[in-house]
Amino acid sequence: LAGSSVGIFDNTLVFGVPKYAGTGGFFVFKRANKNSQFKQDQNLKPNQLLYPLQSGDLYGTSNAINEVYLAVGAPGRDDACTYRGRVANNAESDTGAVFVFIRESTAHPFTFLQKLNPTNVRKHDRFGISLGMDHRTIVVGQQQDFKGTLQPAKTVINVTTTASYLGTKLGASFKLEWEYMRVSEGVMSAERQTTASIMFDATAPEFEEILE
């Protein structure tokens, strides 16, 4: 399956090998001008700390490229991205994924940007089986379609708060601060974020709105 998905933009040639090393592979070739030969420039992978490639991912099955962006499909990936309402389920077989890369110009290498997460997919949907791109818009195809109610994945599943002393509610407000991991140009770093002031008797829906 070498070169089962091939893309070209200007002097950049890319192709995927979905069964390479069991996980799939994706390769970038470049040339100096139209009269020179292509030479391998990158063996491109998503951030392996956040999204290590897994056996059977079929990474490289599809791709779409332009001057700045590159999208690579992995329709065989098993992801915990199946959502029905607010509950995130365990990983399912072949839900699929798409990884997006970015570069400053055609002279620069691609670096990992993000993983696209669909909502309400189920096993064997194979999200990422086909890809298209127009400027900053990416269109993703999948083989099947979950027909349930479409609802976004929620970061906050449930919140319960109490602020009382000897049965009496205490009047006050507080802030929440949390740390998350951010990836920029292939480098992962810790970032902190703080909410606005929250009243002590905030309801769970109010918490969700503040945090999300």
Image (spheres, helix red, strand yellow):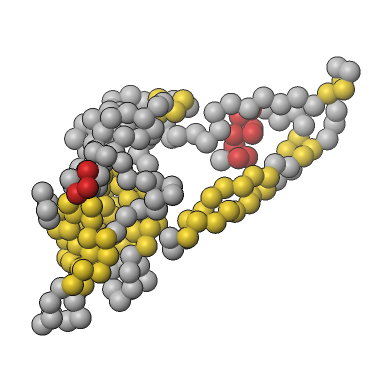
Q: Quadrant of residue 152?
A: top left
Q: Quadrant of residue 211?
A: top right
- Judged left or right of residue 144, residue 37 is left
Q: Position of residue 160 (x, y in %)?
A: 67, 24
From where the camera sits, is residue 66 visible? no
Q: Nearer the viewer, residue 114 or 201?
A: 114
Q: Position of residue 22 (x, y in %)?
A: 22, 43
From where the camera sits, is residue 71 visible? yes
Does 157 sit above or below residue 193? above
Residue at (41, 26) in percent of width and height: 89
Q: Quadrant of the C terminus?
A: top right
Q: Nearer the viewer, residue 189 or 174?
A: 189
Considering every residue shown, the one lying at the far top of the view is 167
Residue at (39, 50) in percent of width and height: 48
Residue at (59, 37) in percent of width and height: 209
- Judged left or right of residue 186, residue 99 is left
Q: Quadrant of residue 70?
A: bottom left
Does 30 sit above or below residue 49? below
Q: Position of residue 29 (x, y in %)?
A: 20, 68
Residue at (18, 72) in percent of width and height: 39
Q: Position of residue 178 (x, y in %)?
A: 64, 44
